[in-house]
Every structure is written in structure tokens, then in C-alpha cells.
């Protein structure tokens, strides 16, 4: 029995408790964007180290030297706009992390045929009370030539304010969010996503 993509998406929403333009798919019918994420897949944000961790994802074995697993490539651009609403000490820096899982998302078995990509970096100040992180993330995965299940892309992102004024750096505040299931971009294409957060 197959479950609709929205049921596949419930677990990621529960993962965001650290401080709380899609294109049509070419491999399978497109998803409608949801605010949920795949069942059994859990993202968590290690704000101290600025890393996003993905758990509960089982990778589908990739056939060795098989023509049934063609290369699927592309680039995902992620922009995180930070509104600085808290009163941080002078010299505070802002750091962002982004992670995405994409490919064939099998709701029956919980397997993912595709990949997991991550990026981390410091934001640049863009004005009074604002900063922006921009990531360009290329990827190359092996996907089945005829996926038997739905395809999609799930993005998780976090931002943190890091105070370097003391002897050791201190995370003053952080935020973490998980976007819903997006359409899997076309092969060899570039997709861009913009997210707004407040610290």
C-alpha cells in the first residue's frame, strides 16, 4: 500500500526544536508543496557546531556499474535572509547551515535513492539589522531510470548568532526550520530557494 506524499512528510516537522519556486519533476508526477516532511526522517540542528544532522533515512543501494542508475546532476541555490531582532553584543557573527535530501522517496519502505547534501558558512551583513547566507550546492546522484515511487526534495536550514566577545565563543540564539517537500528539479538544472529567519 502506498501512502500519499503528505503522510510521508510528517516527521520532519517535529525535528525543529533546537530553538524551534520549485520546478516540475521529470522523473515522476510533481508534488504539491507541503509544510511537512517524510515519515521516519528526522533532522536536528547542532547549534553549537552549526551542523544539521539527518537521521532515520535509509539509503537504497545503488546498483554497481548499472545502466539502470543514470547520473542525475544539478545545483541547488539556498539563500537565508536573517532579520536581527534580538539585542546582540557588538561583534556577534551570524552563521547558517543548509541541508537537503532528494531523489526517489519510497513511502512504503522508507528508502531514499538519491543523496544528502550539506553546506555551512557565515552570513554577510546586508544592512542595519539584516544579514544573508548564500549557498551554491552542486550535486550528482545515481537515480533509478524509472522510479517506482514519488520523487522530491526536502530542505532543512538553520541560523545562529555567535558571540566571540568572551574567551570562548557562545551561541546567543539559534533557529531551525524544515521546508516541506518540493518538486525534484529537472536533471542538469539549477533551482533556487529563499528562506527568511529571525534571530
Image (cartoon, rainbow, N blue to C red):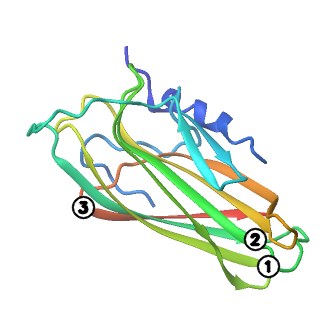
Binning the other alpha carbons within 10 Å of mark 3 as few (below 14), some (14 to 19) or many (20 upward) gives few
| Image height of 71 relative to 196, above or below | above
| Position in image of residue 15 (x %, y %) | 66, 37
Q: Nearer the viewer, residue 147 or 97?
A: 97
Residue 93: x, y in percent? 74, 73
Residue 162 shown left or right of residue 157 in the figure:
right
Cα–Cα span, label 3 and label 1 = 37 Å
- Counting from the top left corner in percent of width and height, residue 158 is at 65, 55
Is mark 2 in CB contact (under 8 Å) with mark 1?
Answer: yes
Q: Judging from the image, what secondary structure is the residue with disc 2 in?
A: strand
In percent of the image, x 59 and y 58: which residue is there?
Answer: 97
The residue tagged with tag 3: helix, strand or loop? loop
- Residue on which disc 3 sits: 188
Classify residue 198 by image quadrant.
bottom right
Q: Earlier in the sequence, mark 3 or mark 1?
A: 1
Residue labelled with disc 1: 129
Instruction: Give the residue at the far front of this rendering.
Output: 167
Secondary element under disc 1, as helix, strand or loop, is loop
Tell which circle, 2 or 1, labels the residue nearer the N-terminal end: 2
Please name the residue that numbered disc 2 is placed on. 83
Residue 23 locus on image (x, y percent): 36, 57
Residue under the point 50% across and 33% down: 38
First in sequence: mark 3 vs mark 2: 2
Asked which quadrant contains residue 29, the reply is top left
The N terminus is located in which quarter? top left
Crowding at mark 2 (Cα within 10 Å: few <14, some 14-19, many 20+): some
CA distance for labels 2 and 1? 6 Å
Instruction: Give the answer, above or below, for where 112 lies relative to 80.
Output: above
Amino acid at each position: 500500500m502506498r501512502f500519499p506524499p503528505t503522510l510521508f512528510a510528517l516527521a520532519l516537522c517535529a525535528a525543529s526544536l533546537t530553538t524551534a519556486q520549485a520546478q516540475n519533476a521529470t522523473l515522476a508526477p510533481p508534488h504539491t508543496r507541503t509544510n511537512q516532511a517524510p515519515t521516519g526522517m528526522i533532522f536536528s540542528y547542532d547549534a553549537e557546531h552549526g551542523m544539521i544532522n539527518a537521521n532515520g533515512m535509509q539509503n537504497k543501494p545503488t546498483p554497481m556499474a548499472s545502466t539502470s542508475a543514470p547520473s542525475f546532476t544539478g545545483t541547488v541555490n539556498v539563500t537565508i535572509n536573517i532579520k536581527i531582532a534580538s539585542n546582540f553584543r557588538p561583534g556577534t557573527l551570524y552563521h547558517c547551515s543548509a541541508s537537503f535530501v532528494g531523489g526517489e522517496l519510497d513511502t512504503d519502505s522508507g528508502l531514499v535513492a538519491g543523496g544528502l547534501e550539506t553546506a555551512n558558512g557565515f552570513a554577510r551583513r546586508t544592512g542595519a539589522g539584516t544579514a544573508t547566507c548564500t549557498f551554491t550546492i552542486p550535486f550528482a546522484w545515481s537515480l533509478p531510470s524509472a522510479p517506482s515511487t514519488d520523487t522530491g526534495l526536502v530542505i532543512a536550514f538553520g541560523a545562529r548568532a555567535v558571540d566571540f566577545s568572551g574567551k570562548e565563543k557562545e551561541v546567543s540564539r539559534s533557529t531551525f526550520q524544515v521546508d516541506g517537500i518540493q518538486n525534484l528539479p529537472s536533471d542538469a538544472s539549477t533551482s533556487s530557494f529563499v528562506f527568511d529567519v529571525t534571530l
